[in-house]
Each structure stands twice: as structure tokens, then as C-alpha cells.
């Protein structure tokens, strides 16, 4: 089963690394280079339907904190995984309170990443929203 | 005695100043008071006794003068009496000769018929040739009948003196003496031998030579005040002062004082007087003659005056002697006291080393002993105090060292805390390339294509270098401060590093960081401390703009030879009531995880440590500008 993953990260090298890690795992990557772009992708009238969001924290324009808050508010059925370089407990706790599925600190191994994404997708909740379109 | 000898000295000098003030208030010294007291005690009896002596002396003098005047008056009266007796005796002899003279008898007895009513029998007798030449004063001598006696008071009297009368023809005062001529052996007078004497010629030779001093003389007066003989006043003139006259014409000898000298002057005088007892018996009733001794009062009282001067001189001399003696005595008493005072001053001045050496064997020595006891106790107290001060100083030094150490630790701790707050930023900076490296390594592991592997490997190398650069940049921040020595620091370089560090904590690019650097002199400091100052101020600026767009502008300039750093943000600003507390330790408006409130406290500590200054300007919702100035090492 093919899942679409929205990767929001400003670092080209990081996005490339994610692509490499998810290559051949059945997880298709949709890229956005900052929070603002990520929000635009989702808001574009479901042109693209994603099964999970992989979001960085430090980004220009709209940063990860704001972007995740938006995703959780507007698309609560889509699991969000924070993938960041900040080994910051406070930040992690704040994100968990927002309802993110996981707070991953880079560097993260390929297997760990994939497992985390798959787990998040399988455990996604439907909070007052419509059934996801399959 | 290392303790503030100077301080103690100053304090004691102040105390001495107080003493000086007191001594200025003193009007009389102890010595002066003693002299005054002794003079008072000595002078009052002296003056009293001298006054009494003068009073008694002048009284004695009066008595002596009065007594001598009286004696002189008596002596003179006796002489006049004697002269009169002589004349009366001569007259008596002549009267006897007349009795024996038949011619005289015939004249007196021959013509009985004339009786009492017959014309006066009168003829000169003895004849002028027989007149006794020795009696120069004799003016006339004649025999008269019984009727010829002008004022026979007692017919049985031996002789009669008729008193003083003025001979209008010769303008001479005349004394008339009548001596009875008896018949034979009988006692019945048959006539009178009448003789007139010139008073002046008779008495002046007796009265005039009796002179003493310059003005002293005797005078013969009668009880009506008429002058009979006086070397100074005319015979026949009068003493007008009735009081004086009454007091000197008593029927006994004596002396008196009067307010009139009898010679026309109203001055105090002493007069001696004596009645002429022999003469007065022959005088008609109601008349008496008196001897009166007079001297000019100025002359009389000259001895009294000299006595007074003598007494005054003696008094002054005694007073002078008394003053000198009392001064000598008081200085004997006062000198040890003055020494005691000097010794006390010495002690007050802080010299406690020498014992008080005053050996007078009296209360002053006891007092000195007490004072010395106080000196010893004071020295002990001061020594204890000095020990305490030394101990306290040592404690303070230790405390200061402890404080310095704590401050140093605080600076270091704050730095570590600052690093903590940006640890995630650093982590982000390193973890991103690490993640890329991991991803490439995994790809190499799974990749069969060698050229792809090579590309991944190049990526790994690139990312590794990136990490290395980051670590190198950060390493300066985590070394302990004490390992660094003072060095010349490029402020611009440190600001750039601090900005780079601060950027790490930014989650996005909303804050526009601007650098306006000009070349400025280096400053002399520990570089990590300067870094800490810059990082703290910049981080505060960034935090003031958190979540919003803003500008952080860092400027360096050279102003008044000082390196001037301005860090300006467009953040929320500082409330007026918080401005004064910004540099207080543990003052913060941030959340519990954003800092301990030590940042600006440490900043100011470091800035002032390097003789710098820091000022704040802030407007709420407009932003804050922090200006830091350091003295530059050298001009560019």
C-alpha cells in the first residue's frame, strides 16, 4: 500500500536524505521547503492527499512550531512527526502536547524513521473529521 | 600597632580639639585664681590693719600734737605770768619806795581836806631819771590818790591789772597796773602807784620767740577774743569764731580740735591752750587771759600725711610681696597640675607608651597614679581593639576573596546556562549535517553503483567539514574563564561570533540581523567574558522580538576615544518600572526556562571590571538600545 508523506524541511540535503531513506519503502515523498509551502500544499483543495507529515522545526517564513500547530488544527486526522536537529526536551513536550505522533531528533536511522512513520499512520485517529478519502 | 594609628590619631586629635575649645573658654588659669584667692585672704586683713593703724596713728599724732601744744601753752602762760609777776614785784618795790619817800607821803597825806572828793592827786613818780631802764615797755609811771584807781575791785588786793585798752593818743595797746601805797606799817592804802606798760613791748619779747616749725607760734588772747600778742595778728584784732574762742578760753589747760584755725581759714586744726592763772587773779572780774598755741594745719598734718603715704607704701609693698609670694606658692601648686595636664594631653594624643612620672607626694601624685592606671587600661583596650580590627580585616579580605571567587563562578555558571539555552540551537546545527551523513552512509551501504557511492561519500566529507567548523566556532564558549589571560580583543570579531551564536537559537528568519562595524581600537580583557557580554545582550534583544518580525542592529563606533557598541532591537521594550532593576541579580521578566535573571547583572559586572560603562534606552513596543563603552587600548 502506497502512502504519501509530506516532508517539510528547508534543507535540501536533509530532504534528499529523507528521500534516500524512504526510497523503496512504499512511502512516497511530497516535498515542501518551508512551513508556508507545506501549508499551501495541504490547503490546495486536496490536490494532494497525504497520509503523514514529516516536519522540521527551524525554517524560514513559517517555522515548524507554527506549521505543526496549523496542521494539527486544520488536519487533525493526519499524523505529524517532528524531525528536527533540536535535542530540546521542552520543545519536544510542547509538540507532544500539540498531538504530534513522534518527536524525532536527527540523526535518525532509516529503519527507525520508516518504522515511526508506519506506526504513526497505523495509529492515526479520526477526531471529528470525515473519513479519509482513500 | 598596625591598626589605623592614623585613624585613632585623627579621632583623638578631634577630642583634643574639644579640649582646646574648652581651654579657650577659661578666663583665669588655676594659678591666677590661687593668686587672687591668696591676695583676697591676705589683702583684706592687711588693708583693715593698715587702715586701723593709720586711724590710730593719726589719732596718736593728734594726741601728741595736742599734748605738746597744751604743754607749750602752759609753758608760755607761765612765762607771761612770771613776767607780769616780775613787773608787779618791781611795782611793789617802787610802791614801798614811794611809801618811804616823804615827798610822796606828804603829797598823799598832806592835804587831808581834799578827802575823797578833792581833785585827784597825781604826779609822775619816780622821776623819769630814776625810771628803771630795764623795763623798756614802761610808758608812764605816776602816783595817784585813792581816787585815781580807775576800777578798784578789791581795796585789799596787792595789785590790780586793769586789762587791755587802746591808748587813743598813741594808738598803742596799753596795760595798766595799779599797786597800792600803804601808810607806814599799816595796811590801809593811802594812794596808788599807777604804771602803764606798752603791751607789745611787754609781751612780744616773750611771745615772739616761741616759734616751732614754719608757722607754729603762741598767742596771748583774752576771753573776749582780743589778741594781746601774736606774731601774726595785730594786737587788738579779734578772733571772730565764738566756738573756737569758747573752747580755748577755758579755765584750765588743754587742747582741742576745731574746724577753724583762728587765723581766718576754715580748716581742721589743733589748738593748745592754757589760762594765765597768775594774771587772771589780778584782772577785773569777768576778764581772763589765755595762751593759745597755733600752727598751720597743713604743717600740723604733714606728719599725718607722711604717715598716710608711709602706710600706703607699706600696704602696696605688702600687697606686692603677697602677690609675689602667692604667685610663687601657686606656681608650686599649679606646676604639677600643668604637668599632669600635659601628660593627659599626651595620652589623649595617643602616646600611651610612657608612664606618668609625677612625684609630688600629695593628691596630685595620687591623681597621676589614677590617670596612669587609666592609661594602662586604655592601652590594653586599644591593643585588644587592634587585634579585633586585624582579625576583622583578615576576615573581610577572605570574604572578598570568597566573593571574587563566587562572582567568577557565577559568571562561568551564567555562561554555562546561556550555553544551555542555546544547546538545542547548537544541536540543530550539528545534528542536521550528522543526519545527512547518516543518510549517505546508509545509502552507501545499500547502493551497488560505485559512482553513486562516491557522490554520497563526497557529501559525507562535505558535511563532516561543516560540523568541524561548527565545533571549532563553539569551542571558545565552553572553556573555563580562569584559564584565559587578559588579551587584546577585536570587538567586531567578538560581536560577529556572538551574533552567529545567537542566530542558532532562531527558529526562523523573521529577525533581520544587521552589522554596522567600523574599525575600532582593541580592548584589553578576557575574550570569553567579552563574548559573554555581547551574547547576553544580543540574546536579550532577540528574545524581546520573539515570534515577530524585527531588526537587531549591532553597531560599533569610536566616540571620545572610547570603543562604543550599540545593540538595538525593535522588540517589546522595557517597562519604566523595570528599567532600574535590569542590572539587579535574579531580576527577569522571562519564563522559568528562559534564564535565571543573571544575564544583565553579569554583563554589568564584566563591563565595569574593565572600566567600561553600560547604559539602556528603551521605549515600550518600540525597542531597546543598549550602549556599551570600553576604553580602547590604542587609537587606530
Image (cartoon, rainbow, N blue to C red):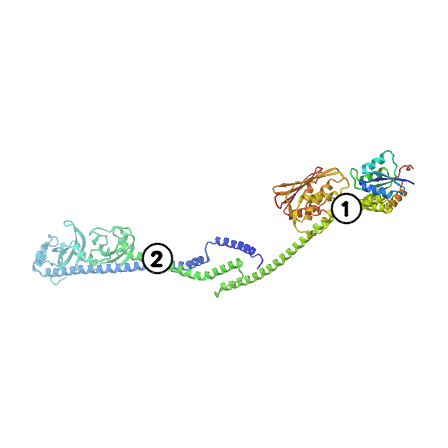
Q: Nearer the viewer, residue B403 or B501?
A: B501
Closer to the camera in the image, A22 or B570: A22
**Residue B91 x, y percent position in the rendering:** 14, 59
Name the quadrant containing residue B330.
bottom left
The reply to whether the C-beta atoms of the residues labelled 1 and 2 are less than 8 Å apart is: no
Q: Residue furthest bottom?
A: B361
Secondary structure state at the residue bearing disc 2:
helix
Q: Are marks 1 and 2 on the same chain?
A: yes
The location of residue A28, given as percent across then percent down, is: 88, 40
Question: What label does residue B479 carry, if any?
Answer: none
Side (left or right) of B594 relative to B521: right
- Horizontal relation, residue B317 to residue A25: left or right: left
Q: In the rendered view, tell whether residue B49 sits above or below residue B560.
A: below
Disc 1 on helix, strand or loop?
helix
Query: What residue is shown with label 1?
Result: B465
The foreground one among B611 and B333 is: B611
Q: Which residue is mark 2?
A: B312
Mark 1 or mark 2: which comes first in sequence? Answer: 2
Quarter placement of the N terminus of chain B: bottom right
Position above or below: B559 against B66: above
Across and down, in percent, residue B378 comes to 56, 60
- Mark toward the viewer: 1 or 2: 1
| Pointer 2 chain | B
Locate residue B453, reporting x and y percent: 84, 45
Residue B182 seen: no
The C terminus of chain B, quarter of image? top right
Q: CA distance from mark 1 to mark 2?
A: 127 Å
Q: Is B90 above or below relative to B593?
A: below
Is disc 1 surrounded by few (<14), some (14 to 19) or many (20+) residues within 10 Å? few
Q: What residue is rendered at 48% in x and 61% in y?
A: B339
Amino acid at each position: 500500500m502506497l502512502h504519501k508523506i509530506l516532508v517539510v524541511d528547508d534543507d535540501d540535503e536533509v530532504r534528499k536524505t529523507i528521500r534516500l531513506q524512504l526510497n523503496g519503502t512504499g512511502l512516497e515523498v511530497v516535498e515542501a521547503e518551508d512551513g508556508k509551502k507545506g501549508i499551501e500544499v495541504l490547503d490546495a483543495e486536496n490536490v494532494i492527499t497525504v497520509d503523514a507529515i514529516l516536519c522540521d522545526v527551524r525554517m524560514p517564513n513559517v517555522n515548524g512550531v507554527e506549521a505543526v500547530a496549523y496542521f494539527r488544527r486544520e488536519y487533525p486526522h493526519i499524523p505529524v512527526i517532528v524531525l528536527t536537529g533540536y535535542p530540546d526536551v521542552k520543545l519536544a513536550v510542547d509538540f507532544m502536547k500539540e498531538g504530534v505522533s513522534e518527536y524525532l531528533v536527527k540523526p535518525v536511522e532509516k529503519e527507525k524513521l520508516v518504522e515511526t512513520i508506519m506506526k504513526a499512520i497505523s495509529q492515526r485517529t479520526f477526531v471529528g473529521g470525515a473519513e479519509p478519502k482513500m | 600597632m598596625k591598626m589605623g594609628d592614623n585613624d585613632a590619631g585623627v579621632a583623638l586629635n578631634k577630642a583634643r580639639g574639644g579640649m582646646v575649645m574648652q581651654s579657650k573658654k577659661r578666663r583665669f588659669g588655676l594659678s591666677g585664681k590661687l593668686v587672687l584667692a591668696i591676695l583676697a585672704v591676705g589683702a583684706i586683713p592687711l588693708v583693715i590693719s593698715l587702715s586701723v593703724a593709720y586711724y590710730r596713728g593719726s589719732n596718736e599724732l593728734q594726741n601728741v600734737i595736742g599734748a605738746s601744744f597744751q604743754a607749750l601753752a602752759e609753758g608760755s602762760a607761765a612765762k607771761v605770768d612770771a613776767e607780769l609777776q616780775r613787773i608787779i614785784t618791781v611795782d611793789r618795790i617802787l610802791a614801798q619806795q614811794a611809801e618811804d619817800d616823804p615827798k610822796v607821803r606828804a603829797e598823799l597825806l598832806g592835804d587831808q581836806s581834799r578827802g575823797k572828793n578833792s581833785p585827784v592827786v597825781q604826779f609822775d613818780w619816780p622821776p623819769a631819771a630814776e625810771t628803771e631802764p630795764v623795763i623798756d615797755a614802761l610808758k608812764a609811771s605816776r602816783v595817784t590818790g585813792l581816787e585815781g584807781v580807775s576800777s578798784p575791785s578789791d581795796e585789799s588786793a596787792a595789785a590790780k591789772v586793769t586789762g587791755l585798752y587802746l591808748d587813743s593818743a598813741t594808738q598803742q595797746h596799753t596795760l595798766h597796773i595799779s599797786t597800792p601805797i600803804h601808810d607806814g606799817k599799816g595796811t590801809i592804802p593811802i594812794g596808788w602807784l599807777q604804771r602803764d606798760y606798752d603791751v607789745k613791748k611787754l609781751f612780744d619779747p616773750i611771745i615772739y620767740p616761741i616759734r616751732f616749725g614754719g608757722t607754729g607760734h603762741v598767742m596771748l588772747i583774752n576771753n573776749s577774743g582780743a589778741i594781746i600778742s601774736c606774731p601774726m595778728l595785730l594786737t587788738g584784732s579779734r578772733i571772730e569764731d565764738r566756738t573756737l574762742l569758747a573752747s580755748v578760753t577755758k579755765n584750765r589747760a588743754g587742747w582741742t580740735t576745731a574746724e577753724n584755725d583762728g587765723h581766718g581759714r576754715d580748716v581742721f586744726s589743733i589748738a593748745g591752750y592754757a589760762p594765765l592763772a597768775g594774771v587772771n587773779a589780778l584782772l577785773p572780774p569777768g576778764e581772763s587771759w589765755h595762751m593759745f598755741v597755733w600752727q598751720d594745719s597743713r604743717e600740723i598734718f604733714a606728719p599725718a600725711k607722711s604717715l598716710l603715704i608711709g602706710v600706703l607704701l607699706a600696704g602696696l609693698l605688702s600687697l606686692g610681696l603677697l602677690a609675689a609670694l602667692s604667685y610663687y606658692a601657686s606656681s608650686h601648686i599649679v606646676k604639677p597640675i600643668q604637668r599632669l595636664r600635659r601628660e593627659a594631653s599626651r595620652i589623649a594624643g595617643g602616646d600611651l607608651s610612657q608612664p606618668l612620672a609625677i612625684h609630688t607626694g600629695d593628691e596630685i601624685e595620687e591623681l597621676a597614679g589614677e590617670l596612669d592606671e587609666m592609661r594602662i587600661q586604655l592601652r590594653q583596650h586599644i591593643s585588644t581593639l587592634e587585634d579585633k580590627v586585624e582579625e576583622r580585616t583578615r576576615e573581610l579580605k577572605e570574604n572578598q576573596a570568597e566573593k571574587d571567587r563566587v562572582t567568577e563562578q557565577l559568571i562561568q555558571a551564567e555562561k554555562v546556562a546561556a550555553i544551555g539555552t542555546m544547546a538545542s540551537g547548537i544541536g540543530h546545527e550539528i545534528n542536521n549535517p550528522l543526519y545527512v551523513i547518516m543518510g549517505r552512509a546508509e545509502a552507501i551501504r545499500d547502493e551497488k553503483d560505485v559512482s553513486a557511492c562516491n557522490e554520497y561519500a563526497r557529501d559525507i566529507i562535505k558535511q563532516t567539514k561543516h560540523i568541524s567548523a561548527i565545533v571549532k566556532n563553539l569551542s571558545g564558549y565552553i572553556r573555563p574563564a580562569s584559564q584565559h589571560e587578559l588579551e587584546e580583543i577585536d570587538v567586531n570579531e567578538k560581536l560577529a561570533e556572538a551574533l552567529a551564536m545567537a542566530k542558532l537559537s532562531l527558529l526562523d528568519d523573521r529577525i533581520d540581523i544587521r552589522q554596522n562595524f567600523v574599525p575600532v581600537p582593541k580592548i584589553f580583557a578576557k575574550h570569553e567574558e567579552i563574548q559573554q557580554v555581547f551574547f547576553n545582550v544580543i540574546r536579550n534583544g532577540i528574545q524581546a522580538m520573539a515570534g515577530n518580525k524585527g531588526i537587531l542592529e549591532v553597531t560599533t563606533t569610536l566616540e571620545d576615544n572610547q570603543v562604543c557598541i550599540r545593540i538595538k532591537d525593535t522588540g517589546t521594550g522595557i517597562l519604566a518600572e523595570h528599567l532600574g532593576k535590569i542590572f539587579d541579580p535574579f531580576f527577569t521578566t522571562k519564563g522559568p526556562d528562559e534564564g535565571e535573571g543573571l544575564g544583565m547583572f553579569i554583563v554589568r559586572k564584566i563591563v565595569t571590571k574593565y572600566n567600561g560603562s553600560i547604559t539602556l534606552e528603551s521605549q515600550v513596543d518600540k525597542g531597546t538600545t543598549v550602549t556599551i563603552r570600553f576604553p580602547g587600548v590604542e587609537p587606530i
